[in-house]
Image (cartoon, coloured by chain):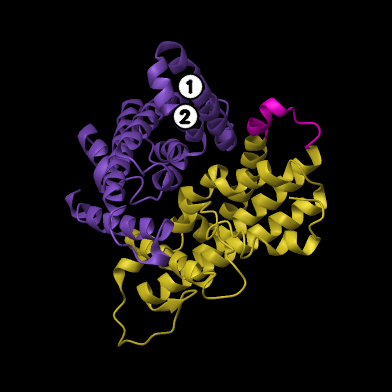
Chain colours: A purple, B yellow
């Protein structure tokens, strides 16, 4: 499969949030403001990219040669948890302003199912190294896209007369349903 | 989490008052992803409850031995181990269900519901109390998953647990078994729960914060 197809499929057609339901927690939690949605999206894309590289190397250079594929969940999640920690320390050293913007979101990325989902899907689909990297980029772009659109809608929603019982989480789900419906329109493209 | 709470309340609270999905919006990813049929919802709920129970047992037993600084990493390793057990078990004995749930079984590792209960409850309470708490939360989770699965399966395929109940006159709403149906159904269920818990409607007072 060509790299462009993988990228396009991960970002739009099989959007991680709206088609695979991965990363719903930050999608509901951090989508109140467009600015924080952009920061969160960038942080997740960054971690996804590194995760794609590192988990591919671990799976193909360590787990498969030593025949311990059964340990993949344990090793992947440990690697992701320590990667997030490293990224957090690195950003704090290099760029204090960026760290302050992302601050609270960074530790949360560990339990973002989109990251582990990315690693699992690359293994499941038997991607090559470059394909995994492109897949990671595409998934990150798709996540950012969904998050930013959602934040834009929710900023408008604050001014809308939402029925009493639908306020909060319920209307967020309904809006996400509408978005998912819209993204389904891309389904025939690949 | 006060020690005065009776064992019964520890068990009951997960089912409705602090229901992981409806009240705290935890574990949404599997809730939405696998409930296109009641069977899948039930299997996912049972697998999650198994992992929740076993890791609660382990973590509440080890709570005085795990150093505070590395506790999260410790919990994650314990949870991931039990998820591997559940995944291999399903793959060996229920290959059909295992295939239809796909990567959502390993994703139980990052289900916030499980890590949340360990951090908030099992790491501070004894084994018995933690098991009761996990059992309540697990049952609450299973109920939501099965209810969602039943609603989506009836409307989307005209059947319950794979048995056709609606006749030929019924045109299935394809959208209900596709991703948008999951979001819409859960949104309506949450709104219904808000209505049920509304203090101005019932004299019990608000249960959902």
Q: Is residue B66 magenta?
A: yes
Q: In this view, does A184 lie to the left or right of A99?
A: left
Circle number at residue A106:
2
* Residue at figure coordinates x 53%, y 45% from the top left: B106
Let me know if residue B37 appears in the view.
Answer: no
Q: In which quarter of the image is residue B6?
A: bottom right
Secondary structure beneath label 1 = helix
Q: Quadrant of residue B15?
A: bottom right
* Residue at figure coordinates x 58%, y 56% from the top left: B20
Q: Residue furthest left?
A: A189
Residue B189 pos. (x, y %): 45, 68
Q: Distance between the residues labelled 2 and 1?
A: 7 Å
Within 10 Å of the Cα at label 2, are there few (<14), some (14-19), or many (20+) other Cα atoms?
some
Secondary structure beneath label 2 = helix
Relative height, residue B179 to residue B167 (above, below): above
- Which of the marked residues, 2 or 1, is nearer the chain's N terminus? 1
Q: In this view, does B96 lie to the left or right of B168?
A: right
Residue, disc 1: A88
Q: Do the residues labelled 2 and 1 touch (CB within 8 Å)?
A: yes
* Residue at figure coordinates x 32%, y 42% from the top left: A147
Q: In this view, does B28 lie to the left or right of A129?
A: right
Relative height, residue A15 to residue A101 (above, below): below
Relative height, residue A3 to residue B137 (above, below): above
Q: What stretch is highlighted in magenta?
A: B63-74
Residue A9 pos. (x, y %): 26, 43
Circle number at residue B158:
none
Residue B39 pos. (x, y %): 51, 67
Q: Which chain hosts label 1?
A: A
Q: Is residue B88 magenta?
A: no
């Amino acid at each position: 499969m060509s790299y462009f197809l993988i990228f396009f499929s991960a970002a739009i057609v099989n959007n991680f949030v709206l088609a695979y339901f991965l990363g719903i927690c930050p999608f509901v939690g951090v989508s109140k403001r467009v600015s924080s949605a952009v920061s969160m999206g960038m942080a997740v894309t960054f971690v996804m990219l590194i995760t794609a590289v590192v988990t591919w190397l671990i799976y193909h250079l360590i787990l498969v040669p030593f025949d311990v594929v059964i340990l993949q969940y344990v090793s992947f999640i440990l690697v992701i948890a320590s990667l997030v920690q490293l990224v957090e320390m690195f950003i704090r050293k290099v760029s204090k302003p960026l760290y302050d913007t992302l601050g609270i979101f960074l530790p949360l990325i560990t339990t973002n199912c989109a990251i582990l989902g990315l690693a699992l899907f690359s293994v499941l689909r038997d991607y090559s190294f470059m394909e995994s990297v492109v897949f990671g980029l595409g998934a990150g772009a798709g996540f950012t896209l969904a998050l930013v659109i959602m934040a834009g809608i929710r900023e408008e929603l604050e001014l809308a007369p939402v029925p009493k019982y639908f306020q909060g989480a319920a209307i967020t789900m309904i809006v996400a349903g509408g978005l998912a419906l819209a993204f389904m329109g891309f389904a025939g493209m690949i | 989490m006060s020690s005065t709470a009776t064992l019964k309340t520890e068990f009951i609270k997960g089912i409705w008052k602090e229901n992981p999905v409806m009240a705290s919006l935890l574990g949404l990813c599997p809730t939405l992803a696998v409930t296109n049929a009641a069977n899948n919802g039930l299997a996912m709920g049972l697998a999650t409850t198994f992992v929740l129970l076993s890791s609660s047992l382990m973590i509440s037993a080890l709570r005085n031995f795990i150093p505070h600084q590395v506790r999260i990493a410790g919990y994650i390793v314990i949870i991931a181990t039990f998820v591997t057990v559940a995944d291999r078990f399903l793959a060996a004995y229920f290959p059909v269900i295992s295939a239809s749930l796909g990567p959502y079984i390993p994703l139980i590792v990052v289900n916030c519901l499980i890590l949340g209960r360990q951090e908030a409850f099992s790491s501070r309470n004894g084994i018995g109390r933690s098991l009761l708490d996990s059992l309540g939360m697990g049952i609450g989770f299973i109920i939501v998953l099965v209810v969602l699965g039943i609603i989506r399966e009836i409307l989307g395929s005209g059947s319950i647990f794979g048995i056709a109940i609606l006749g030929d006159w019924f045109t299935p709403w394809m959208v209900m078994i596709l991703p948008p149906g999951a979001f819409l159904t859960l949104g309506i269920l949450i709104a219904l729960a808000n209505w049920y818990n509304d203090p101005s409607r019932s004299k019990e007072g608000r249960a959902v914060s």
